[in-house]
Each structure stands twice: as structure tokens, then as C-alpha cells.
Image (cartoon, rainbow, N blue to C red):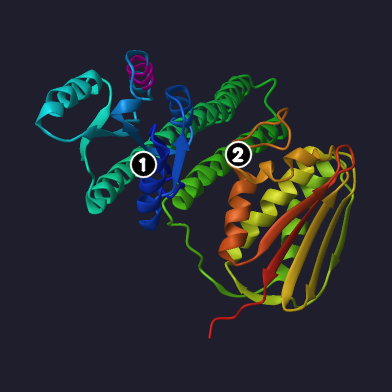
Amino acid sequence: MSDRHLNAILLCPTGQDAHLITVVLEKASISTIIVTSMTELCERSKEDAGVLIIAVEALTSQGIELLNQNLSTQEPWSDLPVLLLTSGGPKNKQSSIQFLEAFISSGNVTLLERPLQHLTLISAAQVAMKSRRRQFQVKNLLTEQIQATKIRDEFISIAGHELKTPLTSLKLQTQMTKKISQNPEKFTIQKMQKQLDYTINQIDRLNKLVDDMLDISRINTGKLRLEKSDINLSILLEDLVERFMPQFEAVNCQVKCEIQAEVIGHWDSYKIEQVINNLFSNSIRYSPGRPVEIHLIKEAQKAIISIKDYGVGIEAANLERIFERFERASSANSGLGLGLYITRQIIELHEGSIKVESQLGQGAKFIIELPLIFDT
């Protein structure tokens, strides 16, 4: 994180010098940690170091070797600044150059001659700390890029598999339909209708996959927009229940509805329909042969929709995870794992909320709250 707290790590054999440097830096809001050995300094450099400040009299051949080894094994994004406090005067110039040469191949090293001016010390430390924060920014950008690439590759893999499945089925079904049509003895209207129904189902599945992928693109680019109007949520929900009833009946789900009349608000009708479609589809997928309860009430200037099934349920550890991208309530089911992620994004765009209550083996209850907001 670019705003992470960083410290100046100070190795100075003279306790009085260490104290004076600490006082000067802390007046400039640079926190300082005093260490007593090169080993301790190298250990602290792996944690929260913004700059290493080392008095040359604390250096030995072994200490230089240890510090060089530590600096040379940094991550590619890291170039930890080092301030070497040397003794001033012409007679110490040659030794100062030797110290600089000892570190120049593996470290970002600056020499500061003593006696130190307070402003010089503060300025050098601030520049070093600023450089170090930028390095952490680079690290974060690299991490985000790696994660984005991983998500992209995962999405392409899942999308390719999910799109291929209905396309393969469509090809096989079309071949079967062609074969039946060429055999007058086996051709019947009923068989043809069955084949066409199956084809329509696969096309609907493809449409759903494509719509989800387009929605993800719009969400990622901030282009998912709402087209709000005054809608009667009661009528919309009743229509959707009726539309889904054949699918509920096909898997022997008994549907119980309690829908309060005239729950009217200012929402995007198409997007709310998309949300409910996702939740109905999940109930059908995860609780075949079991009841589904659908409720709608108006309470405290909010519309509250709840959809409860008695299916496989969700583990407590996964109750939040299922609303993330590419996550499924169960790995045994197909799909891009985008439905609930898109659902949450749509609800939050409406300034509402969605949550799930569930226990493994005892079904799941999704609860949506939408504010009854009207544009003025």
C-alpha cells in the first residue's frame, strides 16, 4: 500500500548520536527505530523499512558482506535506500569512496558527511522515504496486474467451456433433427416439436451466458447503467412467477407466494427482472423436488423480496464468497459463476442490499431490500 507506515532504521554505535538523529527525524514526522547490530538491521529491513541509516563506524567487513547479501536478494520491485553517515574532512574522503564502492553494485546508497546539517539529513531521509513508497506502489500495481491476468485467464477458460457445451448440444440436436426429417417413417410433428424445444432451450442458455459476459464488461468499465421508471413490483413478481412456473413444475418444486399488492417504486424494470430470474434459476437448480417460498412486502419505505428454498444449502464460510465473480454455490453445477455477482451489483446500483441466510443441507433464503425512491 502506498500509504503504509514506514520507518527509518538506524544503526549507530554512539547512543548519543542515535538519539540526536532520532529527535531530528521525528520532528519531521519520520519515525525511527534504533537497532544494535547489522543482523538486526537486515531483519528489520524485510518488514517496514523506508530507509536504512548507518554510521560507517558500525561497519565491518562481515557486516558489509551481510548487508550486501541482503540488498542483492531484494524483490525485483524493491530498491531499499541506504544513507551512510561518513566522517568529514579530506583524510576521510578516500575511505568514504571505498564504502560507497562496497555497496554500489547492490544498493541505492547515498553518502552524508558529518557533521550533519539538520535540513540535509531530513531532506535526504524524506527523498528516500518517498522513493520507497513509490516502490510499494509499483509492487501493488504488479500484484493487481497479476491478479487481473489470472482472473482474465480463468474467465476465458470457464467461458470457453460453458459456451462450448450448448454449442455442441445444438450441433448434435440439429444433426438428429436433420436425420429425422430425412426419414419419413420416423418423422412426426411431436418429435420435431421436442427437438425444436430443446434447441430453443440451448439458445436461451447461450443468450444468458452472453448477457452475463456483457454485464461483467459493463460493470468493470463502470458502464452498467439503470433506466429507471415507476414500476409495480407486485405485478412484475407475479408475472415472473407465472413465467417460471413450467420450470418449477418440471423439477417438482411446489411454489408458495405471498405478494403484497401495490408495492411501487422507481427502479429499472429490466434489471430487477434479471435479478429475480437469477434467484429463481438458482432455486430450480439447487432444490429440485422441494418447496420454494416467494414473499414481497413493503416496510419502512423499502420493498423486501425474499426467495427461500429447501435445497442443498450453503456452507457458512461461503455465504459471502458466492457473491464474488466466478464463484458457484456448488462446484457440481455449471455456469460462469457470475449470476449472484451481477445480482449484487444491480441491487447496489439501486442503493439496495442483498443477503443470504443458509445452513448446509437446510436450503437458502435470499433477501433483497430496495428503497422506494422516486426521482424529483
Q: Quadrant of residue 281?
A: top right
Q: Residue sitting at 72 percent across and 78 percent down?
A: 301
Give above or below for 64 relative to 5.
above
Of the numbered discs 2 and 1, the one sitting upstream in the chain is: 1
Q: Residue sitting at 79 percent across and 59 percent down?
A: 306
Q: Nearer the viewer, residue 187 or 206?
A: 206
Q: Residue sitting at 34 percent across and 38 percent down?
A: 135
Q: Amino acid at mark 2?
A: Arg
Identify the residue under disc 1: 17
Q: Residue sitting at 35 percent across and 56 percent down?
A: 28
Q: Is residue 250 visible?
A: yes
Where is residue 2 shown, x and y percent of the image? Answer: 40, 47
Identify the residue under disc 2: 205
Q: Quadrant of residue 366?
A: bottom right
246 magenta-colored: no
* Range of magenta residues: 63-70
Q: Nearer the viewer, residue 353 or 283?
A: 353
Give above or below for 4 relative to 337.
below
Where is residue 323 shown, x and y percent of the image? Answer: 65, 46
Where is residue 84 shown, x and y percent of the image? Answer: 27, 32
Q: Is residue 14 left or right of residue 327?
A: left
Are the residues at dot 2 and dot 1 in contact (C-beta closer than 8 Å)? no
Give above or below for 243 relative to 15.
below
